[in-house]
Image (cartoon, rainbow, N blue to C red):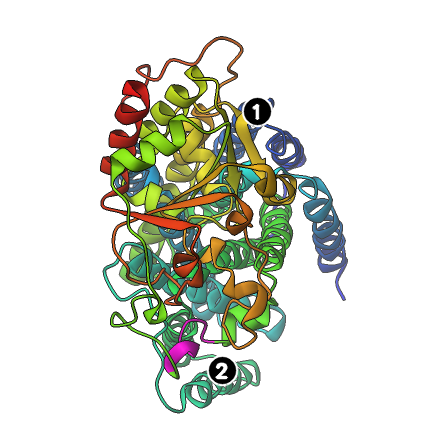
Amino acid sequence: MSERLLFELTVFILSIFVGFEVISKVPSMLHTPLMSATNAIHGIVVVGAMLVAGAAIGGEIGRTLGIAAMILATVNVVGGFAVTGRMLQMFKAKPTAPDPQAKKS
Amino acid sequence: MSMLRVPSLEIVYLITGVLLIIGLKFLSSPARAKTGNLLAGIGMVLAVVVTGLDTRILNWTDIIIGALIGVPIGYFSARAVKMTAMPQMVALFNGAGGGAAALVASGEYLRLNAAHATTPGELVPILLSLIIGAVSFAGSLVAFAKLQELMTGRPVTYPGQQVVNALIVLAIVALCVLMLVGHATPPLFVAVAVLAALLGVVGVLPIGGADMPVVISLLNSFTGVAVAITGFVLGSTVLIISGTLVGASGTLLTMLMSKAMNRSLANVLFGAFGSAPKGGAAGAAAAGGGGPVRSASAEDVATLLAYSRSVIIAPGYGMAVAQAQHSVRELSAALEKRGVDVKFAIHPVAGRMPGHMNVLLAEANVPYSQLFEMDQINPEFEHTDVALVIGANDVTNPAARNVSNSPIYGMPILDVDKAANVIVLKRSMNPGFAGIDNPLYENPKCMMLFGDAKDSVSKLAAGVAAA
């Protein structure tokens, strides 16, 4: 096993524990925003898409793959964060009397 | 290419990883959730900017073309989507992420193939990322189609289904082995991709619409895993950290959701839920098993509500499709004005996703303090005058308690039938999403108010205000 793979496996295994630990106590009202947020976070694949699209290897097929990867990854990351933001927008703190007419969306 | 690490870039990736972890942590509390999303967003921007400095990027044209197409699609569809359609939107974005991971793996394969460097050590993560990403991509599209009602929400089953699915898995494994022992040719690679996508489709087809939240959550964690493995492919720790975070937290969320339905994940995935009531009273003809059902007028119900001391509202997907949450808020305000104690009972799987009802009610400005989770509220039904069920069916179905051959047997439900009166707002007598009859409707304490939920609730609010 190469040193690099060993290092990456270490990061991988430790991240599994962090992933379980970090969200273990979530009130169910936040489950949907949380799912949406984790969905946005795997949009980090945009980093991979940039590397593949920017390498410009593999002729026309390679270019098509790279552009398609960029499109899908940016849809994931931008859409993911925007949708999560919209959901969380609704969880306003309500110290004052709520105003039913305030929102029309 | 993976060894070309620049330490200063790696530090920024580490900061990104930390920001994502803290962001997720903050997202677990209502007060800090927005900050959490912001922190995760900052982390993401940092990662993208720093990747722009990576020496491996030789050509910006394709990156810019892709971003110019993808960014507006993602942004505007996220702005335009209705709150009720949120679950399928998440499914779609998730599918995009899975597809991106599969394409990145394909790009790496192309590079290695051109360099004749397709060693097993490089191929294993590429194939895993390709397969999991493609399954997530295609599966998410099917989940989207089911929730968007582009196709039937009911389980799609046919004879020999499990055999066909098993054969697809075997074929994928066989092709991968062939590639690893030295036949890593592009046609085989494409075949693996196609079969994996097919597996995603046939895997989600037999799962009923009622179980889609669990499936979307599971596919979400799949994409996380695919992205993490892409991190191994590209030697990128930030992908490994972020993808694994999502994979692990998504798996946990999936298990919590299956648990809320008192079923194992395996049962959700392979049980062909909803196809069970074939023998017996099934289909549109079954008007609640034939027992007498009482229906009431909006005026009657409004009077009953106005003169009761306590009301518990149990919302479900019917409230979401009718966009009735604002009317529900008005009704609850009208009742409170008369001194009626109003509470909301939120079943963990009401709607199409956990927390779906909370999001909608929050949108309508219903305060959190009025929302109660199932375990908190269930003991209170006995002392409640009226339980008002708005478009919730399966989560109030007493068959889950005592009909051992019911597909939802054992699922914890809201004990609405313990209230002194039960009012059910429903569009028609059609069975719920799971396709199961609800004996609650034949309960002598129960009255049905038929019609569009928004319409009915508005009438009730007006009636209560006038009473």
Per the image, label 1 sits on a secondary structure element best described as: helix
Q: Position of residue A28 (x, y in %)?
A: 58, 41
Q: Position of residue B331 (x, y in %)?
A: 36, 26
Q: Chain of mark 2?
A: B
Residue type beneath disc 2: Val
Dot 1 crowding, Cα within 10 Å, few <14, some 14–19, many 20+ = few
Give the distance between the C-alpha atoms of the residues marked 1 and 2, in whole angstroms. 49 Å
In-image side of B272 versus B81 (left or right): right
**What residue is pinned by disc 2?**
B169
Q: Position of residue B462 (x, y in %)?
A: 26, 24
Question: In front: mark 1 or mark 2?
Answer: 1
Classify residue A74 by image quadrant.
top left
Say above or below: B210 vs B198. Answer: above
Residue type beneath disc 1: Ser
Instruction: Tell me which residue sits at (51%, 43%) in the image.
Output: B420
Residue B107 in sight in this render: no
In the rendered image, the residue lying farthest to the top is A96
Q: Chain of mark 1?
A: B
Instruction: Tell me which residue sits at (64%, 53%) in the image.
Output: B252
Classify residue B164 by image quadrant.
bottom left
Q: How many marks?
A: 2
Question: Which segment is the magenta one?
Answer: B272-278
Residue B294 in sight in this render: yes
* Residue B275 is inside the magenta segment: yes
Residue A105's disc is none
Q: Position of residue A66 (x, y in %)?
A: 36, 53
Per the image, label 2 sits on a secondary structure element best described as: helix
* Front position in the image: A91 or A42: A91
**What residue is pinned by disc 1?**
B369
- First along the sequence among labels 1 and 2: 2
In-image side of B75 versus B101 (left or right): left
